[in-house]
Amino acid sequence: MARTNPETRIRLVSTAADMLRRRGLNATSIRELAKAAEAPLGSTYHYFPDGKKQVVLEALEFVGQKVSAMLQDAIQKDAVDGVQTFLGLWSGILQETEFRAGCPVISVAMEEATTEDIELMHREASNIFNRWQAILRDGFVDDGIEATQAEQLATMVVAASEGALAMCRAEKSLKPLENVTAQLLVLIRNAKGQ
């Protein structure tokens, strides 16, 4: 019977998330994952008997939960703080990876749905985007923004940040994200009546 090491499993999941944000879904394989995580190939299949589908779904959930927790904490203070924190997270990732990594959720969402496994991954990506939007929307409403406008602003924040990430990576510049951040903050302050 194989021994279970939670640290190895977590390392595999976080490495898979990193590979997705750098390479995308098709360029992320179980063999490359084991190599990048410095784990035996056999242990990868031990932890993820359903293979790539399972590890990608768990990597997406890992990222989704991590970002959701950060966003939930930040948005409780103030809508503007929440958005600045959310966009600042992506800015930090771009800088620390020298524009080599973006958001693993969008990388999976952009894959062509050629199999049921990819459809399942798309649904998980959609769930994560919806979760982030719900956290933002609820934070906006709590901060005094009308519900319909809060919903629209939440969608705009997530969509604009994901688009800005792609532009930043292509241009090797933070300018698109900085521009998006500035305009989103103006919209949110206006919606709050500031």
Image (cartoon, rainbow, N blue to C red):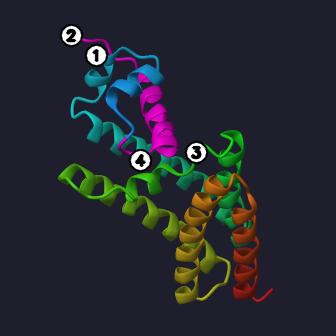
Confirm or deny contact between disc 1 and disc 4 (CB under 8 A).
Answer: no
The residue wearing badge 3 is 101
**What residue appears at the point 71 percent right and 56 percent down from the top-left corner?**
88
Mark 1–mark 4 Cα distance, whole angstroms, equals 23 Å
Mark 2–mark 4 Cα distance, whole angstroms, equals 28 Å
- Per the rendering, the mark at residue 42 is 1
Give left or right: position of 46 versus 70.
left
The first of marks 1 and 4 along the sequence is 1
Mark 4–mark 3 Cα distance, whole angstroms, equals 18 Å
The first of marks 4 and 3 along the sequence is 4
Q: For the residue carrying disc 2, how many other residues have a C-alpha within 10 Å: few (<14), some (14-19), or many (20+)? A: few
Where is residue 98 drawn, in percent x and y? 69, 42
Q: Secondary structure at mark 3?
A: loop
Where is residue 27 drawn, in percent x and y? 39, 39
- Per the rendering, the mark at residue 61 is 4
Confirm or deny contact between disc 2 and disc 1 (CB under 8 A).
Answer: no
The kind of residue tagged 1 is Gly
Magenta-span inclusion, residue 116:
no
The residue wearing badge 2 is 1
Span shown in magenta: 1-26
User: Which quadrant is the N terminus positioned in?
Assistant: top left
**What residue appears at the point 36 percent right and 14 percent down from the top-left corner?**
40
The kind of residue tagged 2 is Met
Closer to us: mark 2 or mark 3? 3
In the foreground, 87 or 27: 27
Closer to us: mark 4 or mark 3? 3
Q: For the residue carrying disc 4, how many other residues have a C-alpha within 10 Å: few (<14), some (14-19), or many (20+)? A: some
